[in-house]
Every structure is written in structure tokens, then in C-alpha cells.
Image (cartoon, rainbow, N blue to C red):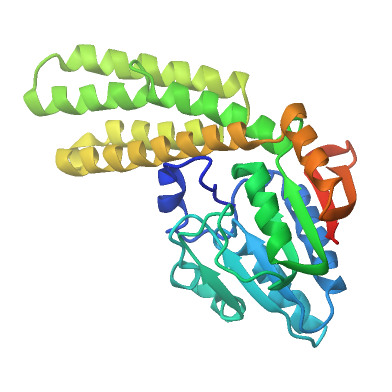
Amino acid sequence: MAHSSRHASNWGWRRYWRENRLAACVPENPDSAAAIETYWSRIFAQFPAGNRVLDIATGNGVLLVWGARTARAAGRELTLTGIDLADIDPARFLPEHRADLAAVRFIGKTAAESLPFADGSFDAVVSQYGLEYADLEPALSEAARVLAPSGRLHWLAHGAGSIVVAQARAKLVDIALLLSSKGPFAAMRAYVKARVRKRKVSRATRELTEALRRAESHCAAKPPATLVHQLCGGILETANQFERYRPADVDDWLNENLKRLRGERQRVRDLLSACLSRRRLARVEQTLRAEPWSGAEFSSFDVGATGDSVGQLIQAVRL
């Protein structure tokens, strides 16, 4: 869920996991997201009682929450561990999932390329939109090392042709519009300054109006552009009722959302860099078709009536 040391800054994710969100990088279509949950529930249902499961790049632990629920429904126990490069603390930020999260051991500040576990510590390694952020060869080597003989790897990775990656590319365009030098945020900042100084207000109003019109045209041409629509709606409402707000509070709102946008931009860039291009996928295939791995399987995870891909499914067995 969050990237490993291939993206050494990690700053786009540190903040992300300190909010009430269970998952990241999921499809915007709820039916597709539900199909992913169903898939993982089937995987966890196959694990015998007592199996030790490691989730690499766990984020706030969505896979292990599903695992805990599946095990509980089947009346069995699994030993669940999640690691992430970010300094995670899911129970603190997800109180509604606290019961499921209590069944999991979470370890933050841990890279996939250097796992703090003894050889053969786990019966299964799982990862959803996470392991691909790491340096592939050392991360897969570590996964093999900590797996017991006959242990399995189950990995859903970002594929270059997936709808999740397409949505990420579209979001990057949305963010570029919002952060541009003539975009809504820059125009709103100039508008606040003009209103406070009571100088060049007409010009600032005109430039803000033009920026919001460009954003509106963008949303019409590239639906859903939800992020642009929501933030520009907030800017428009604030500008129309400016007298109701303290300028300092408006500045704080703008700065807070600019921080979020820059963090989101970094995360999206990381995602696009991490997705399994043909070249990276070929490297994974080469690694998993050689010892200590066997039985490697690769398939596109296609969902819905149109068969949209939500990623690359990868499975292998540790010899």
C-alpha cells in the first residue's frame, strides 16, 4: 500500500496513512473494489488455522482486516503481521476497525528489501498495490527468505494497463491544473491578498473567475475530475461569502489543501513509477520462474461486464 525504499522520500505516504482511511489506490468503481475484497477473502479462506501471514507494504492494513474477518467467520485463527515503510499506527486512526486491527501486529519504518524476520517465519506473503514499489530483486529475495518451504506468495500489483493506473494518470492532470501558476489556488491566493489590501480587487476577481471557468471546462471535458470539482466548489463558495471568513482562516484552508495536493501528487507519481511495465513484469517473471520459487502464475485481474483490469495477479510457491 505504501512504497518501499525505491521511493526513498516516502513523504507522500507518511501523511496519507495518518488519516481515517483503510485502503489506497483502489478503483473508483465500488463494484471493482468489492471484487478485489471478494478475491482476497477467498485467498484468506484457503489458509489453514495457525498460518502465519505477512502483508508487505500494508498501509493501514486493509488486507489484514479482511484476513481477520475471514478467519473469524471460519472459526479459525491466523497470525497476521503487516509491515510498511511509513510510520503506521492503524488502530489510532481507524477506531471503527479497531477490533479487527487488534488481531494484527503492525511494524512501521520497515522496508520490503530488509525484513526483520528470521528465515522461514511465514507460511504466506501477501501484498496489494505495495510490493511493486520496492526494488524488485531484493524485495522478492526477502519474501522468499522469510517464507517457509511450500509457503505461497499472493500479490496484486499495479499493471500498466489497469484502470487504477489510468485513474492515477487522470488525477495527475487534475492536480497539475489545480497547482498551476494560473490555476484556482494561485488565483484564490491573489484574490485574498487583494481583498485584504483593498487594491486591484476587480483584477483579482476577474482572474479568479477565469481560473474557475477553466476548471469547470476541464471537469466537463474529463469527468469525473472529482478532486477539481470539490476543491473549486470550496474556493467559489469562500469567494462568494468572503466577508464571513477571516482572511487568515482562508489562507490556512488554502495552505492545508495545497499540502494535501502536493502529497497526493507525489503518491500518484510514485504509483505510476511503480506499476509493472512490460520490462518490470519480465523481471518479476524471470525471478519467480527460478529457484527458490516454483509454480509461478501471472494473470490480469479483470472485473465487471467490460472486463476492466484492476491489476496484475502474481502467485508463486517457495520451494
Q: Is residue 90 above or below residue 315?
A: below
Tell which residue pokes out farthest to the bottom in this image.
75
- How many marks are shown on the rendered structure? 0
Write the residue at 28% across / 31% down.
239
Report whether residue 41 is seen. Answer: yes
Q: Nearer the viewer, residue 16 or 32?
A: 16
Q: Nearer the viewer, residue 150 or 77?
A: 150
Write the residue at 16% across / 38% down.
247
Write the residue at 59% across / 69% down.
117
Q: Nearer the viewer, residue 251 or 233?
A: 251
**Percent of width and height locating residue 89:** 46, 67
Tell me: 285 left or right of 222: right
Quadrant for residue 238, please give it. top left
**Percent of width and height locating residue 26:** 66, 47
Tell me: 245 left or right of 164: left
**Percent of width and height locating residue 19:** 44, 58
